[in-house]
């Protein structure tokens, strides 16, 4: 560190299991950037003060995680149009006191698909869940031109979001209640299935949202859960002959795209992935 060092970090609560510090600090070092990435545990009621602190301390960039992704918006000066449409921010860039909010969860998800050679345009995509993560994913899929079906345990939430997506994307998104019958119907001609619920996340790693007999390859199954790295859903999808993408890929790409917004440098994605996997394995053990 020196007088010209720049600081980035992540705000959330809890924050101690975040993989972002190891990913970003390894990336800064590799590229030879004089930056440091710090985790900050920020309680809900301290969010405004934390953002004022970002300005006062001239912190270059922050990632924003649970529970602040929506609540942070009123404290920012500008929103990138995609973050505005999603209504959530996971990355802030500080340009000489002007704070702009971005959503690299959405762009990171898309990048993780494209990196694997999967172009969602005109594909049938089934998204499970209608929470924060699902909203970013569903919107970017619809904007890219996927035919979207959202399934959620609480049907009202799925319907509300699907009709909003249909309105802004001028393409119909369907909503169904998450149950076996509807899953079977949706998966009968699906190209992409995304689990954007927390089903299967440690310590409930024996759970899965989809019974394996419903997989109809060719199918790509993307699980945003990255803890465990290989969820039961991914193991069973792989066994059924589906292509699988782990939540680690979305974690890495949302980080890589944030890194590029802060530094202007190309992110060392391979290294960031290795660091994330190393950190997650330590956490699993
Ligand atoms: P996130 O921001 O990570 O998306 P969230 O906003 O709390 O988190 O959303 C969690 C999602 O997982 C929701 O879609 C939730 O369904 P409900 O809207 O019905 O609550 C879904 N979810 C979590 N646990 C679930 C379970 N055991 N069965 C079905 N859906 C579940």
Image (spheres, rainbow, N blue to C red):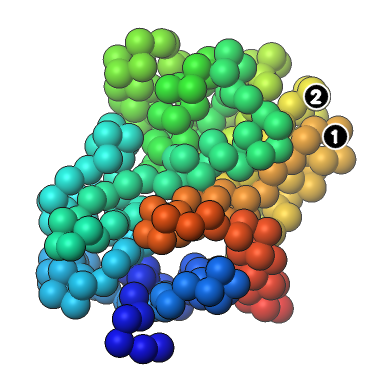
- Viewer can see residue 8: yes
> In the displayed structure, would residue 166 be above or below residue 266?
above
Total label count?
Answer: 2
Nearest to the observer: residue 264 or residue 81: 264
Where in the figure is residue 209, as x and y percent of width and height?
A: 63, 40
Q: CA distance from mark 2 to mark 1?
A: 7 Å
Q: Is residue 55 rendered to the left or right of residue 266?
A: left
Residue name at image x 86 percent, y 33 percent: 241
Residue name at image x 36 percent, y 71 percent: 8
Residue placed furthest toward the bottom? 2
- Image quarter where the C terminus lies is bottom right
Q: Is residue 114 rendered to the left or right of residue 219?
A: left
Secondary structure of residue under mark 2: loop
- Viewer can see residue 225: no
Q: Which mark is residue 217?
A: 2
> In the displayed structure, would residue 4 be above or below residue 181?
below
Where in the figure is residue 172, as x and y percent of width and height?
A: 42, 11
Residue identifier under label 1: 240
User: CB of residue at label 1: within 8 Å of ligand 1?
Assistant: no
Where in the figure is residue 227, as x and y percent of width and height?
A: 62, 61
């Amino acid at each position: 560190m020196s007088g010209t060092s720049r600081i980035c970090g992540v705000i959330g609560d809890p924050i101690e299991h975040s993989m972002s510090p190891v990913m970003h600090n390894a990336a800064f070092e590799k590229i030879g950037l004089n930056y440091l990435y710090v985790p900050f545990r920020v309680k809900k009621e301290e969010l405004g003060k934390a953002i004022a602190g970002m300005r006062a301390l001239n912190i270059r960039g922050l990632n924003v995680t649970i529970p602040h992704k929506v609540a942070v918006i009123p404290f920012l000066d500008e929103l990138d149009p995609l973050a505005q449409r999603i209504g959530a921010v996971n990355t802030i860039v500080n340009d000489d006191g002007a704070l702009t909010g971005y959503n690299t969860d959405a762009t990171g998800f898309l990048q993780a698909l494209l990196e694997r050679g999967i172009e969602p345009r005109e594909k049938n995509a089934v998204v499970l869940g209608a929470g924060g993560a699902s909203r970013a994913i569903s919107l970017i899929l619809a904007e890219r031109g996927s035919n979207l079906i959202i399934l959620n345990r609480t049907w009202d939430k799925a319907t509300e979001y699907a009709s909003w997506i249909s309105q802004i994307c001028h393409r119909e998104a369907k909503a169904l209640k998450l149950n076996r019958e509807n899953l079977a119907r949706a998966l009968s001609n699906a190209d992409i299935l995304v689990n954007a619920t927390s089903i299967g996340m440690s310590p409930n790693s024996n759970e899965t949202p989809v019974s394996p007999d419903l997989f109809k390859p060719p199918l790509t199954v993307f699980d945003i859960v990255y803890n465990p790295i290989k969820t039961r859903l991914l193991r069973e999808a792989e066994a059924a002959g589906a292509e699988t993408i782990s939540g680690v890929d979305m974690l890495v790409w949302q980080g890589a795209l944030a890194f590029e917004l802060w530094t202007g440098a190309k992110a060392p994605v391979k290294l960031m992935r290795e660091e994330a996997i190393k950190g997650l394995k330590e956490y699993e053990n």
